Image (cartoon, rainbow, N blue to C red):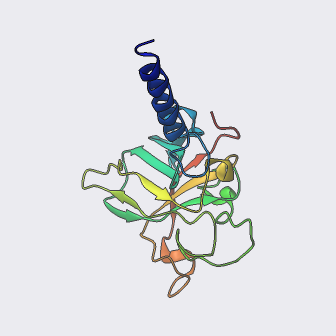
Amino acid sequence: MKGSGGHAAAMRSAAAVVLAVGFAGGNGSPASPSEMPSLTVDIHATDSGMRLGSVLVEDTADGARFTPSLSGLTAGEHGFHVHENPDCGMAGQNAGGHYDPANTGRHEGPDGNGHLGDLPRLAVDGGGGATVPVVARRVRVSDVVGRSLMVHAGGDNYSDMPARLGGGGARVACGVIPATAS
């Protein structure tokens, strides 16, 4: 039975590879990107309603990754948040406040213990495009479904001082997050 020991060893190795790949996420979740929940959010200017692009939101082992494909924004850093309501009407005001399921009432940025909707800043290049992904470690896709995604006019200092909510200012772009992920 030459080779039967080799076949069994090969099967054990294959099983180990399947287990390693299947649980590489570290929390027992599938590591395959095709098996991770994701959704796409269409983003529109709050003043004109013009479509500016979209943001892909997908779960990763490190948290939710927000990958923008946006144009028509002003260059620089922008406050980027998940807002409470799935409504971008009234120039984004219908979206309500930053998503804060624990009712902390604090804006502490993506790594703090405040609003869950506080995301890393959105970087916009000199041509008005945003394509650099950000990862929100405390967030999963299931946390944001049925909410809205907001881009603010200015940056975000991840604090309520000296200006409330990071000082990002006006709501310049918004998208309603679908109620279900794929």
* 1 w.r.t. 146: above or below: above
Outermost top residue: 1
Q: Nearer the viewer, residue 149 or 95?
A: 149
Up-down: is 107 above or below 76? below
Q: What residue lies at 52% left-to-right and 83% top-to-bottom?
A: 163
In the rendered view of the protein, which quadrant contains the C terminus?
A: top right
| Up-down relation of residue 136 to residue 145 (above or below) | below
Residue nearest the observer in this picture, 43 or 137:
137
Does the rendering let one see residue 89? no
Among all residues in the image, which is located at the extreme front?
Answer: 1
Quarter of the image with the N terminus in it: top left
Image point (60%, 39%), residue name: 37
Residue 74 x, y percent position in the rendering: 34, 58
Picture coordinates of residue 119, whole percent (x, y) = 52, 63
Vertical placement of residue 57 versus 122, above or below: above
Quarter of the rendering containing residue 154: bottom left
Indicate the position of residue 44 as horizontal and vertical percent values. Answer: 51, 45
Q: What number of labels is visible?
A: 0
Please indicate, yes or no, whether residue 53 appears anywhere in the rendered image.
yes
Question: What's the residue at 42%, 46% (across, down)?
Answer: 68
Q: Residue at x 64, y 70 (%)?
A: 115
Residue 146 image offset from top left, x and y in percent: 70, 46
Residue lying at the far left in this picture: please name it. Answer: 126
